[in-house]
Amino acid sequence: MSLNGLDVFDETIHKTNSWLKEIAQQLGLERRGAYQVLRAVLHCLRDRLTVNEAADLGDQLPMLVRGIYYEGWHPAGKPEKIRSLEDFLDAITSRLQPQQPVDTEDAARAVFRTLEHQVSAGEIRQVIDNLPKTIRALWPPLSEAAVR
């Protein structure tokens, strides 16, 4: 029997909790902190991608994570012209709650690692190819075995 009345809702809650758990374990955070990190990094990544690539990535996210990803998105003027690693990390920091002390580079790496485990290798390659080399360095080496 479904806990929420619809299996699709149960499935997306389960998948989202799995993502949050993975991020929380990597960063030593509680679930709320992992959510803040996931949201901040996804928004910065989304805004740095072309509109088409942002939509392609969004198509592969679980329904609930997709809602977080698209929250407040205004595709006009995208991609943002962030070219340096420092500017990208500053953008993430500006989206994190002040009471959420976390190393921004570690946060980006944790979310990117989780994306690598959860999104197809082909899509991850396209996302990486859309980023400047300095930001690409945050991604873990792409391992085919770990990607669905």
Image (tube, grey):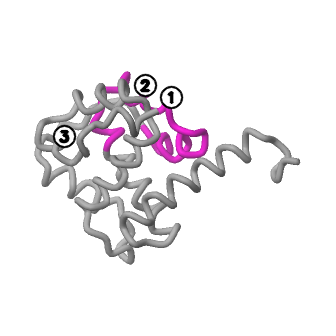
**Vertical placement of 62 versus 114: above or below?**
above
Q: Residues within 10 Å of mark 3 (few under 14, many from 20)?
A: some
> Label 2 belongs to which residue?
56
Per the image, label 3 sits on a secondary structure element best described as helix
Q: Distance of mark 1 from mark 3, alpha carbons?
A: 21 Å
Callout 1–callout 3 Cβ contact below 8 Å = no
In the picture provided, is 148 more to the left or to the right than 123?
Answer: right
56 drawn magenta? yes
118 drawn magenta? no
Q: Which residues are magenta?
A: 45-73
Per the image, label 2 sits on a secondary structure element best described as helix
> Label 1 belongs to which residue?
59
> Label 3 belongs to which residue?
136
- Indicate the quadrant where residue 63 lies: top right
Q: Residue at x 13, y 54 (%)?
A: 86
Q: Amino acid at mark 1?
A: Asp
Q: Distance of mark 2 from mark 3, alpha carbons?
A: 18 Å
Indicate which disc, 1 or 3, sits on the residue closer to the N terminus: 1
Q: Amino acid at mark 3?
A: Arg
Q: Residue at x 24, y 37 (%)?
A: 80
Q: Amino acid at mark 2?
A: Asp
Q: Residue at x 51, y 61 (%)?
A: 21
Tag shown at residue 148? none
Residue in the foreground of this view, choosing between 129 and 88 = 129
- Indicate the quadrant where residue 33 lies: bottom left
x and y percent of residue 108 in the render? 29, 54
Magenta-drawn stretch, dominant element (helix, strand or loop): helix
In the picture provided, is 130 more to the left or to the right than 145?
Answer: left
x and y percent of residue 36 in the render? 44, 62
Indicate which disc, 2 or 3, sits on the residue closer to the N terminus: 2
